[in-house]
Image: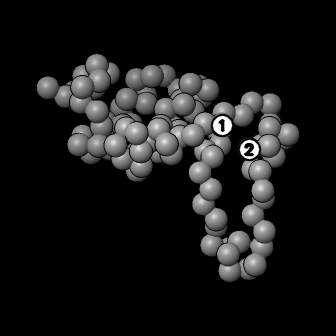
Amino acid sequence: MVNDHQIIPQTVQTENMEYPKDVVSICYARANLVISEKLTDLAVKLGNVRILNFIMLGILSNFLPFREQSWKDVLKNRVPLRFLLPDRLWLPWHH
């Protein structure tokens, strides 16, 4: 999974290295499946760029062998409720 938002790693900056020009193309050349979207733009549109990892995890969850309830349980136990979307039907613990 590739987000198109470029963040230059500190090591690249401090060691005068060159960051690859087209990371998405490199991924397509090396992987069987690449999901590349403007996910940062989506996070901003949803109101908080900090939810980017949740968006990416949600996409990734479709490709991993975990039960849906396992994802819900982890979110319930690890993420403060104020950061979740209580209007979603899959949050059965929110009343």
Give the side of residue 6 with respect to residue 27, left or right: left
Give the side of residue 60 with respect to residue 52, left or right: right
Q: Residue at x 63, y 46 (%)?
A: 4
Q: Residue 56: where, in percent of width, then height?
A: 53, 39
Q: Residue 63: where, in percent of width, then height?
A: 61, 26
Q: Earlier in the sequence, mark 2 or mark 1?
A: 2
Contact check, label 2 and label 1, Cβ < 8 Å: yes
Q: Residue 24: where, in percent of width, then height?
A: 74, 44
Q: Which mark is residue 52?
A: none
Q: Residue 72: where, in percent of width, then height?
A: 37, 29
Could you give the CA–CA distance between mark 2 and mark 1, rounded to whole angstroms?
7 Å
The N terminus lies in quadrant: top right
Query: As drawn, which residue projects farthest toward the right?
Result: 29
Q: Is residue 33 visible?
A: yes
Which quadrant holds residue 43? top left
Which quadrant holds residue 32? top right
95 or 56: which is nearer to us? 56
Residue designated by label 1: 36
82 or 18: which is nearer to us? 18
Q: Is residue 78 visible?
A: no
Question: Above or below — where is 33 with respect to 79?
Answer: above
84 or 36: which is nearer to us? 36
Question: Above or below — where is 6 with respect to 58?
Answer: below
SS under mark 2: helix
The C terminus lies in quadrant: top left
Q: Residue at x 36, y 31 (%)?
A: 73
Question: Above or below — where is 4 with respect to 59?
Answer: below
Q: Which mark is residue 24?
A: 2
Q: Residue at x 63, y 72 (%)?
A: 10
| Residue type, mark 2 in image | Val
